[in-house]
Image: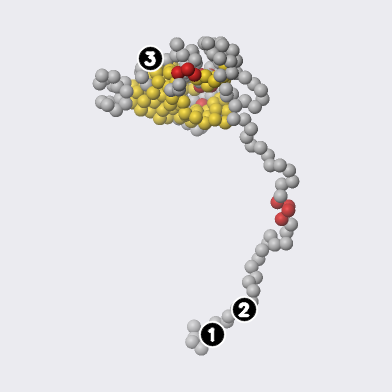
Amino acid sequence: MNQNQTRRKRPQGPSRKRNPRQGKNMSQAVISHPPPIQEYAVRHGTKLRFVTNAAFQGVVTFQNLLDTMLMAATAVLGYDIFLAVKIRAVEVWAEAVAGTPVTTTVTFSGANAGSLGDQRLHTDSSMGVQPAHLRCAPSPKSLASDFQVSSSATAFTLSCPTGTVIDVDLTFVQATEGTATPAQNALVGAIAGAPYWRGLDGVAAAASKFTPAVYPTVII
């Protein structure tokens, strides 16, 4: 640019920024009625811990998972506190006994329509002082990873030795339409109205291979 040339300056004055919303009636954005409610029932995310008092090899059903948390109606009749359950993860620790390796296995092996698992087998073995350890979850593309109601459908297959520690990471959802699902097996000496916990096999504490890690008087 030639030194003799000067830049044309814009005339001084107030800024002329555009404001397309200026002048509009802002009351149009106000909702004219109370906002909708997106959740009403209790949704409870929790981790339940169990310790096996005997070796276990078998299936854990969605009914078993929902039977872990019960409400007593009578001394022998109990109902599930929640209507549906979702598996977020299963974590297992199994310690070697007298230097002998042990193996634990979890498979999301459900084959029922509506609760089909991904059929993926997860396994680990102990070595020395290191316990066998698994943390696994059903594929998010499998139906086993979605909310399921109480049924005999397989949630996962479990194989583990005595003394195995098992954490199940679950989300429970309460019923909203007045429905109640009875526990699979009768309670023993329960107090009506009291909550109780059960093992992953759904049977009474005296016969269960799974001991819930809660205060003993609430296990039944």
Name the element at disc 2.
loop
Q: Earlier in the sequence, mark 1 or mark 2?
A: 1
Mark 2 = which residue?
12
Give the label, 1 or 2, closer to the camera. Answer: 2
Q: Nearer the viewer, residue 24 or 198?
A: 198
Query: Could you say which is closer to the camera, residue 28 or residue 113?
Result: 28
Q: Position of residue 95 (x, y in %)?
A: 32, 23
**Sequence-first disc among 3 and 1:** 1
Rendered residue at 73%/59% (across/down): 24
Say which residue appears at 49% left-offset and 86% top-offset: 2
Of tags 3 and 1, the one toward the viewer is: 3
Q: How many marks?
A: 3
Q: Residues within 10 Å of mark 3 (few under 14, many from 20)?
A: some
Query: Disc 1 residue type?
Result: Thr
Name the residue carrying label 1: 6
Residue 12 point in image, percent of width and height: 62, 78
Q: Is residue 202 left or right of residue 94?
A: right
Residue 97 located left or right of residue 22: left
Q: What residue lies at 58% left-to-right and 80% top-to-bottom?
A: 9
Which disc, if any, is residue 54?
3
Q: CA distance from mark 3 to mark 1?
A: 94 Å
For the point 51% across and 26% down, the residue is 144
**Dot 3 or dot 2, earlier in sequence:** 2
- The 10 Å Cα crowd at callout 1, few under 14, some 14 to 19, many 20 or more, is few
